[in-house]
Amino acid sequence: MPTISGVTQQIFGRKPGRGLLLTGLAIILAFVILAVFAPWIAPYGPTERSVPSSLAASPQPPDRNHIMGTTELGYDVFSRIVWGTRIVLYVVAFSAILSMAIGVPLGLVSGFYGGKLDRILSMVMDSIYAFPGIVLALAVASVLGPSPTNAAISLSVVYVPTFFRMVRGQVLEVRESLYVEAAEALGYPNTHIMLYHVLPNVAPTILVVFGLAATDAILTEAGLAFFGLTVSYPSPDWGLDLRVGLRYLDQGAWWATLFPGIVITLLALGFALVGEGLGERYAIRTER
Amino acid sequence: MESVVRLEDVSVHYYTFTGVVKAVDRVTLDIPRGEFVSFVGESGSGKSTLALALLRLVPPPGRIVSGRIVFNGMDLLSLPEQKMRELRGKSISMVFQDPMTSLDPVRKVGEQIADVYIEHGVTTDMEEALKLAREALEMVGIPGDRVNYYPHQLSGGQRQRVLIAAAVALKPSLLIADEPTTALDVIVQAKIMDLLEDLMKELKMSVILITHDIALAAERSDRIAVMYAGRVVEYGPVDAIIENPLHPYTRGLLESAPDLWGEKRIKGIPGNPPDLRNPPRGCPFHPRCPRRFDPCDKDEPEYVKVDDRIVSCHLYTR
Amino acid sequence: MREGVARVGRLLRYIVIRGLLIIPTILILYTLIFILLRVIPGNPILSALGTHYVPPEILQEKMHRLGLDKPLYVQYFDYLWNILHGNFGESMVIEGRSISKDLAYRIPATIELTIAGFTVSVLLGLITGTLAALRRGSKIDYSMRVYGIVAYTLFIPWLGSLFILLFSVYLGWLPAGGRLDPSITLKRITGIYTLDAILTGNPAAFFNALKHLILPALTLGIVLSGAYTRLVRSNLSDILQADFIRAYRSRGLPETKVLKYALRNAMIPIVTYMGLQLAILLGGAVLTETTFSWPGLGSYLFEKIQYRDYSAIQGTIMVFAFMVGLVSLIVDIIYALIDPRIRY
Ligand SMILES: Nc1ncnc2c1ncn2[C@@H]1O[C@H](COP(=O)(O)OP(=O)(O)OP(=O)(O)O)[C@@H](O)[C@H]1O
Ligand SMILES: [Mg+2]
């Protein structure tokens, strides 16, 4: 069992990829803080009309009261970003947990036992994997209807194969190794071998892939939101705000698209850096 | 005695994160024209680095930090890169250790030989160059139609022949072979060595062979240079060195090659070569030397001439 | 000569086998989508019509018209049979509207955009990756690595909006959307406008279409290039250390030639990667199209999702599935052609 100091050593220790890892974690942590403390950080409510109605017909540029400007309905862009963090993190975290919870055990079992089940599962997973993730997520989400939970489920459909393929591949490699053979020779039951010998060995790779899948998931979530499939306007979500902002672009209202876009990319970057840092540390090369 | 290449005080260092590796340290010697000279030494003694220095192809973080390499009257180290490039493959060629990885896997072997003719201006016509490549292949004992083969279609020995064909295509005056047979099985090894010797006579080349097999060196060479920790510790005609090695390290090497001296028991040299980032003071061999005495751990021995040999050891400095 | 014929024969066989292998992939996706759209409880027509009240007779008639009243397994094979014949059925929302026609009109636009975006991404990836590999450990290498990571994390509509803002709104150099100005006439042949303009010898239309293509292609290309930057960098710097590169240098080949052969070797794994990247390319195209009002499959999907036109959504997704299958086949073939070590 890993100890607390062991874990901190893992993350903060002077090892390759430390800078990337710490930067990424700092970015993610900042967004978590935004989400948790949204009511204290956001100066306005997400759908609060925060400008006099005479000005409310068109988006207003940033000023002292609205550091990122306002939207056409007089909503404060900064406040909406802060509140939107909650939706984004909820969808992404939920989908990440769900796709790991399904993909990792399926990959373990499939790779460990092999046989017909393995072949069929692999084929299905490969087919989904080869298909454009966002298109699939859009289709599923449009059937399920717009809601954050449904968006998370749609994202999981896309990312289960990512975890499945990676874990399965690793299991096939680890299976051949000495300690698994030794454990088998000692007559340990399969579940024991999987949990105590195979899983710990594939854990670093799972983490790296998690970083990359989360990066992807954030961008796909933003895509779903852009299509109006996570929340219904005027509930705040970064991708949706960006799309609404696009309408006012030709009036020069840059702030309504610039800021929501920056946070999407920044959060995605946070996870990408974590994945990258871990990859460098454990010298894991991935497809992406 | 005319020399094909003369090294004067050549040093090559690798600037690594953990320190400066003195891979070649102030080497001075003459390679006589038309002779077969072997460099022997343990792994890591700097043989390959020295060979690459002759072509000015030491890879970063390595750098030739000092010295002169005089080839046909020119100092290679002060030539412009363009001139140096023209010499490579034309006047000085090299054959590498691993024939499995030294050919481009996605180009036909004929094309890779033909490159040499085109880059060095023998012809501009690919057809013509391929015809010459065919002849070069036949010269090294491979049927000419193999020009259309990809490397993976040839055996290790055949690939090494292809590499030799490309190296000697323009009849260089110096051929450097860096452990050309290490990756091959014994029978093929002998054949490749025979081929090198034949080509040397036919094309009137000088050959530098790099090997850690002193028996092989003794069998094939005119001269032997023994390297230790980046230094050439002894250099001279092969018979003299075999009969009466001057440097204790040379003696150690010979003692560990049983078939040469007919010893019953193989005697290794105890200990390991030093860390080249931090070599010992004085003579680099002194920690392992059975005959070390007073000055060995203090002063570095100068080169001394003993008959037609040079040696770097305090036993001979006074 | 005879060897050449045999080679072509073997290649054809390889193509057929590879082609057969994509059938299960497409069937699996078809089944998945079918289950998703038809089997999951909830009446798609009802949701397509929104929350309005619909008289039962009308609903019944509509279900019948669209074949939704048949048993599921019949629907499954009927629809499969139909789409294999290029018949994607009828819109659930606009009565009598053929989805096949809509799709046929939109596919070329998506192809044009993806090819352009793909080209931009590969070029950018090759340039940045090569620069990084040649100067490994330098400031350039470092900035290219950062580029490789950041480019991948850019949200396409955002990057697109920045381009629109700069090049359309402020500078007024390039259009913010569409494929062709209404004032320009162009005879439609393939539906790929730049190509049609060349085929009909219409320079005005060509440059106009190109102007419309630049921003979308650049947006898509930049985002996708990050992955190539990293791949080219790591592959090329491995290859540049390879023995055969040193051997090339030892024979006096100039650095430009050495780099050329190194790149040729580095490209082999990258071509495989292009196949994997395809999913991301098509997904990116969907967002790019929506941002730039590019009338392709992506913006079609966007519209149909807004109207919940499930038969159109299903059809679009099947087209995507076919495209994925087809292009991965092409990638396999290219791979076999450029790597002599592949046996076929
Ligand atoms: N690219 C490099 N970077 C850093 N150090 C290097 C590099 N190449 C060689 N060295 C170091 O230089 C020293 C000499 O290496 P070299 O390869 O010349 O030895 P060698 O005598 O050819 O050995 P071997 O018999 O194993 O081929 C070694 O200590 C080695 O670790
Ligand atoms: Mg060597």
Image (cartoon, grey):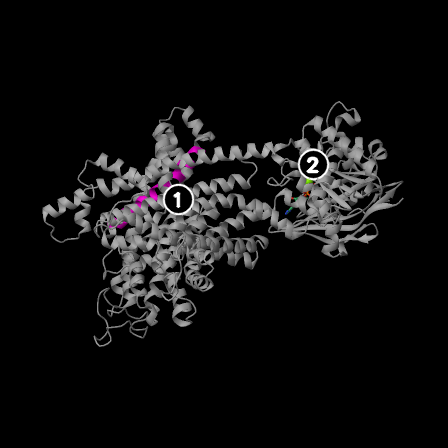
- What chain letter is assigned to the residue under label 1? C
Q: Is residue B290 above or below residue B11?
A: above
Q: Nearer the viewer, residue A255 or C316?
A: C316
Is the C terminus of chain B in the top left, top right, bottom left or bottom right quadrant? top right
Labels 1 and 2 positioned on one and the same chain: no
Asked if residue C260 shows in the view, the reply is yes
Image spot of residue B104 (x, y percent): 62, 41
For label 1, the residue is C324
Across and down, in percent, residue B295 comes to 78, 45
Choose top left, top right, bottom left or bottom right for residue C322. Answer: top left
Indicate yes or no whether the magenta region holds residue B265.
no
* B206, A34: nearer the viewer: B206
Q: Position of residue C33 (x, y in %)?
A: 28, 42
Q: Amino acid at mark 1?
A: Val
The residue that mark 2 highlights is B162
Helix or strand or loop: what does disc 2 sit on?
A: helix
Query: Which type of secondary structure does the marked residue at label 1 adopt?
Result: helix
Q: Which residues are magenta?
A: A149-173
Tell me residue C267's x, y (percent): 54, 46
